[in-house]
Image: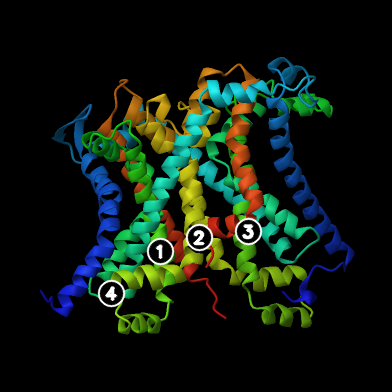
Amino acid sequence: MVLSKDLQKSLWITFFVLPGLVIVAVFILLPLFLSLFNSLFSWNQLIRGEWVGFGNFRRIFFTSPYRERFFNALRNNGKWFLVTMLVQNIFGLVFGYLLSRRIPGHGFFRRTFFIPVLFSIVAVGFLWGLYLKPNGLVNAFLKLVGLEGYSRAWLGEESIATFSIIAVNIWRWVGFPSLVFLAAIDAIPLDSLEAAYLDGARETQVFSRIVLPLIVPALTVITVLTLIGSLNVFEQIYTMTGLDGSPNYSTDTIGTLFYRTAFGSVDSGNPEIGIGSAIGVVIYLLTFFASAGFIAISRGREVEL
Amino acid sequence: MNTDLRYTPSHWGKNLVLLVFHLFMVVYVVLIFYPLFNMVVSSLKTTREIFQNPFGFPRTLQWQNYWVVWVEKGFYRYFGNSLWVTAISMAFVLLFGSMASYGLSRYSFRLSFLLYLLFLSGIMLPLKAAIIPLFILVKSLGLMDRHLSIILIFIAMGLPSTVFILSGFMKTVPKELEYAARIDGCNDLSIYSRIVMPVSVPALALVTIYNAVPIWNDFFFPLVFIQSDRLKTLPVGLSSFFGQYSTNWSLLFSGLSIAILPMLILYLLMSNYFIRGMTAGAVK
């Protein structure tokens, strides 16, 4: 049997693309679509009830206890994003810049900074969870150096628990932006840097006028990844202060709230598929629009050589 | 890198600023190594010693902790499950991912860009947020509490970035190689397997690291889909172990060491490979 050339080509394309496409369609695209669909119905456990339109969304935004829990969690996700941007990514930028200037020991620093990036969030969370206990290593260290007055229940006080967890996450992840920025700076053509130095530009000028504008794509990538990461915080809370975001919901995030709604429940003790799906949709929309926003802003600032 | 641009001591103010940041880097290095060192030392102490003498060394080394955790508490099984699930998932991510990349990058056809976008839609959006429909789907497929559930999800999670990285790479493979092979009588499958795949080995290595590390470390999906203790992967096994023995810190530190040290050793053996792989999605 001789097949026509076009048909043969189509068959080959189907053969190559289909297996991957089916898996992506069934396990990514379909659930994505179903989240949206499910969020528009009321649910009794796993059984779909009647169409409620945006009723589930209204309950999240306007009805107790969901309203308080949702906005409290969202505020914490906001803290995660801001603190991570300000502390982790600025340190990452400075570290990356210094590594690109080949300061003494740069090879060793580069390798070492990336070590915690490889560890699972769960192992890191449990490890630091032990260290941050009232009788853990951190307080023992403060006592050792005579700063006992600064001892805290790092994960037990409402005002600091979230920041303690963020600090642990920064410990784990700061090597990532450092090395992404290092790669971006190393990719800058040498002539532009040389020219600046020959013109007598100071270090700060080189950094702010030449290096920064040329690594805008890397800054965008890191910002978007930080945003996605901050909206998806879950394991860190689960391992260090528990699913309820204790103490008194002060470390609760959208991720843990979503999990409790979907599998345990905030209100009745039963899974709330409708409300859970609505929270899932909100996570998707926030991720999508915020990322798209950052990408649009930075597009205008990119400089091509 | 031009040597002229290396850091050279110059103005004292600049030196001071550099010194401060250099100090930060040294402090961070200590903050990385000391907690890991303390973890291993603590794993060899008794719980009493950990509390009474947190910075000291154990009087007698409690090596049996490792035996207890590895054998009695079933960490060997968690470890084996993680290896199995990661290996099978990665094998299919690489197979289906490279096939799809080949199909999308080496043929020109009308739907190709649309299909490419469909694959990529999974890159930015967090699959965790779709856990409810995934849960219903897995349940209705009868895959609850079976490794196949998380393997399928891990394959789906790995495919978008794999298609993104690999199809970009495969586009750069010269068409002439393909024409020459066709004249020699190769069909499309053997061009894929004998020409394009061998040339793509560096990109395949990157993709492997990029996906295998997050799959190995993943906690969320096994937490939802695996209930039997004998099927748990390392992160979930570690988590239930922490729930059960929360006061026996000596054992907890041994469990943590077993979870963390293999990755550390693997990294020290091939750090550049890991660094390039993990940053592959963010660095052009």
Q: Name the residue located 29 percent from the left edge and 36 percent from the top edge.
A: B135
Residue A43 position in % (x across, y down): 20, 30
Callout 3: residue from which chain? B
Task: Give the chain letter at badge 4.
Answer: B
Q: Distance between the residues labelled 3 and 1?
A: 22 Å
- The three-letter code of the residue at mark 2 reads Ala
Quick check: marks 3 and 4 in contact, CB under 8 Å? no
SS at circle 4: loop
Residue A85 visible in the shown view: yes
Which residue is most to the left?
A1
Circle nearer the N terminus (3, 1): 1
Tell if the residue under mark 3 belongs to the same chain as the one under mark 1: yes
| SS for dot 3 | helix
Position of the N terminus of chain B by quadrant: bottom right
Q: Do labels 3 and 2 share a chain?
A: yes
What label sits on residue B205 in the rendered view? Answer: 2
How much space separates mark 3 and mark 4, taking CA atoms? 37 Å
Q: Mark 3 points at which residue?
A: B272
Query: Which of marks 2 and 3 precedes in the sequence?
Result: 2
Q: Which mark is residue B164?
A: 1
B38 or A281: nearer the viewer: B38
Q: Report the side of B255 relative to B197 (left or right).
A: right
Residue A225 percent location from the top left of the image? 49, 53
Local crowd size for mark 2, using a 10 Å CA cut-off: few (<14), some (14–19), many (≥20): some
Q: Residue at x 75, y 18 (%)?
A: B49
Label 4: which residue? B187
Is residue A248 shown above or below A209?
above
N-terminal label among 1 and 2: 1
Along the polypeptide, which appears first: circle 3 or circle 4?
4
**Residue drawn where x is 10% and y is 74% of the image:** A1
